[in-house]
Amino acid sequence: MTECADSHWPSNSSPLGYSWPQISALVPSSILEVVRGSLFIVSWDEAFGDRYEEWSSHMTADVNFYVELALEADGPLVELAVGNGRVAVPVAKATGQRVIGLDTSARMLVQARARAVEAGVELDLRQVDMRDLVLDEPAGLIYCPFRALLHLRTWADRRRTFERVAASLRQDGRFAWNAFAFDHRVAARFGGNHQDEPVPHTVEYSVGDNRIDITLDGGAKSSLWWATKNEWIGLLDVAGLEVDALYSGFSGEPFADDSQEYVFIGRHRAPAAQP
Ligand SMILES: C[S@@+](CC[C@H](N)C(=O)[O-])C[C@H]1O[C@@H](n2cnc3c(N)ncnc32)[C@H](O)[C@@H]1O
């Protein structure tokens, strides 16, 4: 059983009510794999990583946005789902600070390590599920680019991640991420259709499960579960955070009814004024 596969199993509980170590001690590993496969949808196929460079090559507009936030932050910088270091490397370069990067994918972390070496910057890369974020020192900025929070399948996964973020942020720290807003017109245009760019693939929409499945021609699959504006704000709320800013783009464009991207910045909720 790989560390990466383990990361999709909640670390402090299981659907059977036993802790993971208790179950591991009792049940043969071959059976566990079958049980785990039927209960958890793995949302990032390792083979997706082989084409990630091409897949993400068009996405450059977000880099400066996250770099600017990092330059304004005091304290450690943390990227959730760091992938191949596409954003973390420029952040480390611009700030001169070590960036902690979490990801469940061993293959993506290998790419991030190589990119950091090539750029001559230091990334502190950890094969850790973002739901299990724990830091030695509170962070000045925690950020999650390229819609990666959408790899978290359930409200519970997201709530737990937001709570871990809140517990790991400095009092003046900020949490930034972007995610697409579901648009039925986009779904009608692309759903079920094969596309050649940026990498040959097909997108399927499962509206009932608010899920998009992206399947590359070679078979590698990645799933994303979209969320509404109120869900994002609710997640901040239950974690003791609040909206610092909501844009529709990386240049601070105002968010409006027809916006297609949430670009959120959260912070700790201001204490209520005393009567
Ligand atoms: C779309 S890529 C984003 C990578 C990078 N942040 C970027 O902007 O290019 C999604 C990444 O999320 C990672 N991932 C998916 N679920 C995760 C989880 N629960 N915890 C940490 N990383 C996760 C995948 O392994 C993959 O590297």
Image: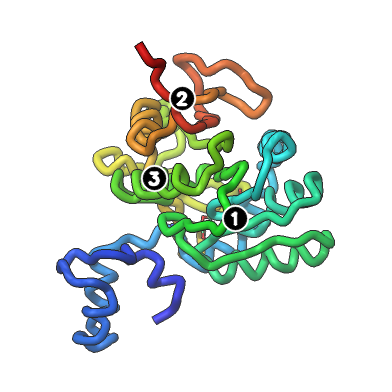
Please name which of the two marks, 2 or 1, marks the residue nearer to the observer: 2
The kind of residue tagged 3 is: Glu
Which residue lies under the disc numbered 3? 163
Helix, strand or loop status at disc 2: loop
User: Residue at horizontal 27%, vertical 71%?
Assistant: 36
**Foreground residue, 164 or 180?**
164
| Amino acid type of the residue that numbered disc 2 sits on in the rendered structure | Ala
x, y percent for residue 74? 68, 40
Mark nearest the camera among 1 and 3 is: 3
Check residue 82 in the rendering and tell me which mark sits there, or answer none. Answer: 1
Q: Earlier in the sequence, mark 2 or mark 1?
A: 1
Residue 200, compared with residue 188, is above or below; it is below
Residue position marked by numbered label 2 in the rendering: 270
Q: Quadrant of the N terminus?
A: bottom left
Observer able to see residue 252: yes
Q: Are dots 2 and 3 in contact, CB under 8 Å?
A: no
Position in image of residue 85 (x %, y %)? 67, 56
Colour scheme used in the picture? rainbow
